[in-house]
Each structure stands twice: as structure tokens, then as C-alpha cells.
Image (cartoon, rainbow, N blue to C red):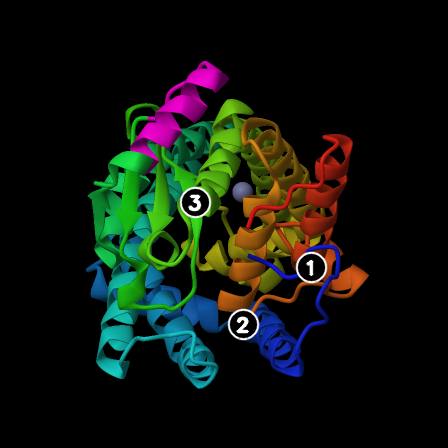
Amino acid sequence: MTDNPTLVQADSPEARRYNRIKRWLGIADFAVAFLFLVVLLVTGWSGWLRDLAYRMGSGNYSLSVFMYLLLLLVISKALSIGLDYYGFRLERQYKLSTQRFRAWAWDEVKGFLVGLVLGSVVVELLYFTIRQWPQDWWVLAWLLFMVLFIVLAQLAPVVLFPIFYKFEPLENEDLRRRLVMLSQRAGTRVRGIYRWRLSEKSKKANAALTGLGATRRIILADTLLDNYTPEEIEAVLAHELGHHVHRHILKSILVQAVITFVGFWAANWTLHYAVDRQLFEFVQISDFANLPLLALVSIVLSFLLMPALNAYSRFNERQADRYAFESITSVEPFISSMNKLAEQNLAERAPSRWVEWFFHSHPSISRRLAAAEAWGRTQGATPHLN
Ligand SMILES: [Zn+2]
């Protein structure tokens, strides 16, 4: 148990340094992608790549679109692999990763292929609609994109995640019983709890609610299951159940729908603007050499919206935490699980205000602990289990 939960521990220099480097890595990654796209457009290299793709695709439009995407993805991977490798070394250096180089490299290959498959589906659909309906393509493309998004959200736990991790139904009877009780109290049901074999790659602990409909499930990392008390795991489960009860996945999809609608509108506007002004030598909007321009619209929009989306996510997390406080008998295990998580994941308990505002999808540990303690106080007795 924690010695004194009311005292927020200061972050170690190690945790601060690790998180600072990770943030800079993320920013560098974004900067590389942004500059790559700008350079492609400004230098006219995108047109050169398009001509090459046409030769590789023997003049067939769809095949050439695929070839162009393949070239783009290969070059951008070559540009970012150094940063990726640095990220891998960083996790090893801070003893957070248990992965060997070969396993990491294999994950990179798999990640690239998954990106290529998903990317091709999206890009082919995009240019198919652009070619058929040059004026109104974006509405249909948005609809198709949302369908794809929902299908993927449903398939992710059974198709995508298993490419990288192993999952098995949780055998622990005691925990299953606790979840059933929690669910009954909530008047809802989650299809299952799965043991997520995270320990093969990482020392960090994690848990999540994933999937849609029949694939809706809570996944709990083995690094958590094996090191936390049943009461602490129950607190984590209660938090994930909170996401389920408050329909956070559905709400996030709706938010996503609104954002991508605006995004597709902006993409269409930008493409027509570029063609009208003959920017970057684009003559028609179905010229797929304009893909970097579409990608730019998308990453700039995501960058600008990041603080808003993170604020929304933090709101959801606070809701899930509150749900957890209400459904467990004492907040003490919640507090101790948070402290354990912070230590295990080398998290910053109290990041600076602007870092939290811009980068964090979860409220800082110190805020979550303060909320738990405040809740504990309103419940009267100071919760102290020994
Ligand atoms: Zn959560």
C-alpha cells in the first residue's frame, strides 16, 4: 500500500528526461513528415514520382496510384527509420522495453505492411471518387471513410492487434466474478476480458476498452495482472467499464465523423484552389501527384486539433475515473494502482501545464490522485486498508 497518498511525489529527473525526449521525438517525427510533403510539392518531385509510378503501373490508373503510394511510403519510412530506431533505443535505455532488435525490426516490417494495406484502401477509394465525381467526391469519400473506420474499430481487437500481440481470454475466476458484479451494478455487459501479453515487449502496464458490438472487450496487460492486487485490478476494470457505460467509443466516432467531414471539405477546397491557380503544376484534381497536398491538409488539421481532442479525451478519462470511484468500495486501491502505473511506466506525475494541455490524452497522475482523494473525503471515512 502507499505510505501517504496525499503527498504527491515529485517526478524523478529520470522520468522528466525520458518524457521530454519522447515528446521531442514526436515533434521531430511530425516535422520530418511535414517537411517531406512540402519538399515533394515545392520541388515538383511529386510529379516526377507520379510519372515513375505510371511507368511501374504500365499506365493503369489504379495500379499507378498504388505504386505512387508505395514509393511515398518507402521514402518516408527511409526518412523516419532513424527516429524510430532512436525511440526503440530510448525504451531499452530506460529499461522499459524487453524487446530485442530483431523482434523490433520485425514489428517495423509488419507495421509498414499494415500501413501499406490500409493506406492503399483509403487512397484507392479517394482517387476513385475524385475521378468519378470531381466536384462532390469529398462527401462520398467521407461516407466511405467513416464506414471503413467503423469496420476497422470493430475488427481491430480480432484482426489488427493480434498481428502485434497475443491475447487470451482471462482465466482468473476471481477477476471475472468481480467484473460480472461491476457490470451488473452498471446494468450493462462487456463481452469479455482478455489477457494481453504485453510483457513480451514491454515492462509497462496498460489496460483498455476496445472494439465495437460483438468485439467489445476489456484488455488487461499481463504486466498489470501479474503485479497488482485483485482490488487494484478491479479499480482499473471499473475505470474501463466507465468508458463502456459512458459510450466513449461511440462518442469518439461521432467526434471523428465531424472532424473528418470538415477535413474532407478542406481537402476538396485545397485541391480545387491548387488546380485553379495551377499550383505545383496540377492540371486536374484526379492527378494523384497531389496526394502530398491532401496529406498536408490532414496532418496540419490533426496538429491544430490535437489540444482540443486531447481536452475531450481528458474529459472522458475524468468521467471514467469518477465512474470507478462510484463503483468500487474504497478509492484506496485506485490510488495505489495509479502510483504503481506511474512508477512502472516512468510517467510524469505532474507535467507542466502546457505539456498536459497540448500532449496528454489523460489527466496527469497528480490530478487523478487528487480527484480520487477528494472523492474519498466526501465518502466520510478515510480509506485506509492495511
Ligand atoms: Zn481510460
Residue identified by numbered label 1: 4
Q: Is 96 situated above or below 255?
A: below
* Real-space Cα separation, disc 3 to disc 1, in angstroms: 20 Å
Q: Are marks 2 and 1 in contact (CB under 8 Å)?
A: no
Q: Secondary structure at mark 1?
A: loop
N-terminal of the pair, mark 3 or mark 1, is 1
Q: Amino acid at mark 2?
A: Asp
Residue 48 in the image, given as x and y percentages of width and height: 41, 71
> Which residue corresponds to the image point at 40% horizontal and 44% vertical from the top-left?
230
Query: Is residue 337 positioned above or below 39 on the image?
Result: above
Q: Are marks 3 and 1 in contact (CB under 8 Å)?
A: no
Nearest the viewer among 384 and 220 is 384
Segment tinted magenta in the rendering: 175-190
| Residue beneath the point at 76% across and 40% down | 374
Q: Nearer the viewer, residue 300 or 208?
A: 208
| Gap in angstroms between the C-alphas marked 3 and 2 | 35 Å
Q: Is residue 16 left or right of residue 374?
A: left
Point out the tag, 3 or 2, that comes first from the N-terminus.
2
Tell which circle, 2 or 1, labels the residue nearer the N-terminal end. Answer: 1
Q: Residues within 10 Å of mark 1 (few under 14, many from 20)?
A: few
Q: Is mark 1 within 8 Å of ligand 1?
A: no
Q: Which mark is residue 233?
A: 3
Q: Which mark is residue 29?
A: 2
Pinpoint residue 11: horizontal percent, then vertical percent. 68, 72
User: Mark 2, mark 1: which one is toward the viewer?
Assistant: 1
Q: Residue furthest right?
A: 353
Q: Within the magenta stretch, is there residue 370?
A: no
Type of residue at label 1? Asn
